[in-house]
Image (tube, rainbow, N blue to C red):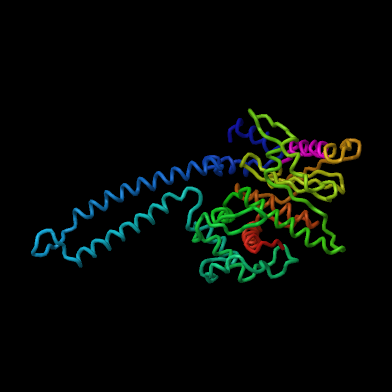
Amino acid sequence: MTSSRRMLMGDLLGDGVNDEVVQRKLDRLQDPIPSLSEYRRRQALRQARIMASERTLALLQAEIGSRVTLPFQSEPGKLDTSSQLEVTSNKEQDVEEIDIIDLDEEDDLLTDDLHDEDKDDLEEEGLAEDSVEEPDDEDLVAGVSVVDEADPKSDLTEDAKRRVRRALSGSLPRQDVLVDLNNLTLTGEDMLRLRPNQWLNDEIINCYTTLLQERNARALEDENCPWPNSHFMSTFFYTRLVSTKDGEADYDYRSVRRWTRKVDIFSKDVLVIPINHENFHWACAVIDLRRRQLSYFDSLGGKNTTVLGHLLQWLRDESMDKKKVALDVEGEGWEQVFPGSSVPQQTNGDDCGIFACKFADYYAQGKAFDFGTEDMGYFRMRIVAELLAKRAC
């Protein structure tokens, strides 16, 4: 790892990050997660290649036609009908084979076929192709997800396993909407981000935290529920609050001022904020208003004082704007907590989004973080099942 790139990542993620895993993430920069503009560029490139292949196909068809020896009838210019049908059939077969090859070669973002190691991961979770039968389309989004909703590592139900297998198989149209939740949607392509060794996008995390929000509301209907009253912010909240210009962080409260017009954050116990570091790394920040504490949970062990400093400033501005009260975050004992590597840590370059989701999930239940990298495969499958069922357990 070059010192300049390592310094850049140090500025981005904070102190104490795991060098080995950061190197794996840096290696991913050779093929980074595409932004929307990059996605559109790739789609345009894909379309251009398809058009080129169609032109090649037309030439190939002409070549095929010129090389086929056709038996003529006694009258010149008349073809034997059976031979003509045979040639047409052969052309259609050639078209089909070329289309299949084209789709396999041009799949820029995700492959339709699982890699061998991904299949092994699915087999470990009981989701291998031969372990479940294919459900009907209408069965894709239905039913409960786990055997025991009180167990954060409960087995998935057999129905849930079938739905997960179908959603991750790559057999569904990429642009079909699989989940429609409070104006948030997930397509077949989004869902493939939950395959092993894939980096989560904003859509997956926002839909998942929406389910956590709804679960929190259901749980708190019981007056004896010990869970904190939690509010989950969008992944876009922090990137709007703090933008990067010329390498410098630019804090702008006005850009998010209206984001909380329908919620009184000071009536909550806990605020959960997913943090997206330039499409490079996910972390989870938590503001615990009961304890006057801000925590930064990072599966790379980072200690990002900049993020918590900005969130503390946001609390001040929010209090003044919404309550007309100056929040004394220094004199009233507010604490910034950086657990570093004492929280569960990732060992690859892809699971940070799953860790961030689980930090949010467990904290909102008041649970200790008793999970590790060995649980990430299961959590990926469980998140798929819960998203399809539109219910977090």
Which portion, as a residue range, is magenta? 302-318
> Which residue sits at x=64%, y=36%?
9
Q: Magenta residues: mostly which secondary structure? A: helix
Q: Residue at x 69, y 43 (%)?
A: 275
Give the image quarter of residue 82: bottom left
Q: Position of residue 280 (x, y in %)?
A: 61, 41
Total marks shown come to: 0
Q: Look at the image and say whether residue 305 sits in the magenta stretch.
A: yes
| Among the 4 quarters of the image, the one containing residue 318 | top right
- Left or right of residue 371, residue 108 in this image: left
Which is more toward the observer, 33 or 206?
206
Q: Quadrant of the N terminus?
A: top right
Q: Is residue 313 magenta?
A: yes
Q: Position of residue 76 (x, y in %)?
A: 9, 59
Residue 83, compared with residue 196, is above or below; it is: below
The answer to whether residue 210 is above or below residue 158 is above
Task: Tell me residue 223's x, y (percent).
Answer: 87, 63
Along the line of sight, the residue nearer the viewer: 263 or 166:
263
